Image (spheres, rainbow, N blue to C red):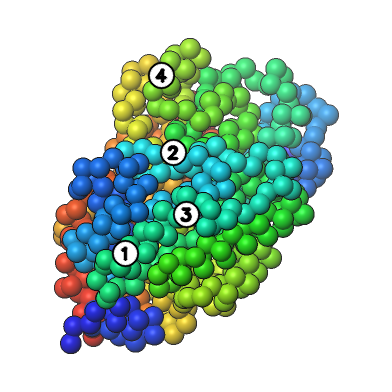
Amino acid sequence: MTMSSLERILTTISHKEPDRVPLILNPTMHPARDMGIPLKKYFTSSELVAQGLIATREKFGTDAYIGFHYSPVEYEAFGGEVIFREDGPPNSGRPIIRTGDEIDTLTAPVVEETECLQVVLDMIKTLKKDAPDDAPIFGVAISPLSLPVMQMGFEDYIRLIYSDEIRFNRLIEVNKRFFMDWATAQIEAGASGIIYYDPVSSPTIIPPELYRKTGLKIAKELIPKVPGPVVTGFASASVLPILDNVLSTGTVGVAVWGGGHEKLSEIKQKCAGKATVIGNLNGIEMRHWTREKTFSIVKQVISDAAPGGGFILSDNHGEIPLQVPDEVLFAIRDAVYEYGRYPISV
Amino acid sequence: MTADFSQKKIDDLISALLNMDRLAVREILSTPHENAEKLYIIDSIVVPALEEIGRRWEEGTLAISQVYMAGVLIEEAITALYPYNEYDSSKKSKIATVVLEDYHMLGERIVAAYLIGAGYSPIRYGRRDAAELLPLIQKDEIKYLFISTLMLPSALKIREISDQISNEGVKIIVGGAPFRFDPDLGKEVGADRVCFTASDAITALREMEGTS
């Protein structure tokens, strides 16, 4: 029996096998290109992004809506300048915190009074109202540990972590308050769950022992308080050395990159029965994939991680670059339909 | 100096850098002897230590925060102990580092620090748009340009300027996340070399200069 997208995802996160492997693709900029609309105009419109997400689902067969405009929206809420461009996603501009004093006086933006956040909430409400009610909507919130990369710039933030515990803790407290308000507002607007975007916690960025004193404590405190399920994303960074800790935070899923020196099969083995693994297609490299190569890679990923459920096929970063051709995304969809039917036989 | 002595110094320096022990770093690198011995220390102690840190980053056992702090400490120590004017003039090749179209300058900062640690004196251009680069490298007579990028669109921008830069006789060395995820991207954008770690930058430069 064919399941709805919602049933498919609920089954797999219950660590059972659905009808086929769920697919989540998030080509955030492709809909604007298809509509012939400049990216700035598209990303600043709740209506257009909602339409784009619905169109993406119909076009590429994705099983969930990622209720997301652009990564720096929270930095923008704190007063940062977002830089829009036509060939890629919006990026954060100059850091908003340039001195220690600015941490001392930093306050969290009020979600209800912040226009850029309201645009995202309006988009989620529109999706909830207009989209077929058979697929979950995931909101996105950056972790309090990871947001300062945009607030301060990476260099100054690393120095702060190692040199000023008092101001580091103060910054994290402000960001914790904001995270809870922002995640809760998205759930109240209609999001089914939250993607907790936490690349700084990865061993690629800080050592595991430092994560256990910082990112782990923050996640264990906040994730259980979010009024909906939470998936943790690491934006292509490594996770294996801290995976047991991550699984202790209450997260229901982990978005990973099982490439390089980490193997997807090992990540899946550790997560089996505890958290759903989401990944593992290389969004940068897939620009060049042929249909044959796409089928071969999808087949391998499904073989490594899909048996037993608890797996969602996606890219490794959470956002497909604009330069990835539609044909590759169609090939991913078709390959999932061909190889992803349970019971898995590849 | 014996090989064992050097290896112990290398190990001590790595420990001091990873423990962020500034005093120990200065002590290990201090020498009352002649300039030639200072050069020996850079080549035989500092560069191998940075290469080992790069290797551990590449294998996933060190984090970027540790690689960065090691760079900061080694830059501080080398700058204090061996001021620019005292150093080997052959190593003053015109080198520049730049981050393309992004305010996240960590990668460029680390590469610059590691090059300084290896005795070079890069000019730091900071954040620049692609169109700004050609006049800058012409004015400064740059021979080796290290370009760091965080986002794929910025990396692809290199393609628009790489031919012009190469025509000036400048070698383009690139690095950053997009290049780690697509091994063919360096070739696609017309780079002469791709570096996957900060210490690769030292190796690449030495090989291209013919001094390795």
Same chain, marks 4 and 3?
no
**Is there any visible trace of residue A99 in the rendered image?**
yes
Amino acid type for the residue under numbered disc 3: Leu
Amino acid type for the residue under numbered disc 2: Ile
Front residue of A26/A216: it is: A26
Q: Which of the two discs, 2 and 1, labels the residue nearer the N terminus? A: 2
Crowding near the residue tagged with mark 3, few <14, some 14–19, many ≥20 C-alpha atoms within 10 Å: many
Tell me the residue that label 3 is attached to. A117
Amino acid type for the residue under numbered disc 4: Leu
Tell me the residue that label 2 is attached to. A83
**Residue B33: image x %, image y %?**
80, 27
Q: Which chain contains the residue that carries disc 1?
A: A
Q: Please state which of the two labelled residues, at mark 2 or mark 1, is closer to the viewer.
A: 1
Query: Is label 3 in contact with label 2 (beta carbons under 8 Å)?
Result: no
Can you tell which mark lies on residue A127?
1
Q: Please state which of the two labelled residues, at mark 2 or mark 4, is closer to the viewer.
A: 2
Give the Cα separation between the discs numbered 4 and 1.
46 Å
- Displayed quadrant of residue A51: bottom left
Same chain, marks 1 and 3?
yes
Residue at 41% x, 19% y is: B134
Task: Classify mark 1: helix, strand or loop.
Answer: helix
Asked whether, in this view, residue B187 is left or right of residue B27, the answer is: left
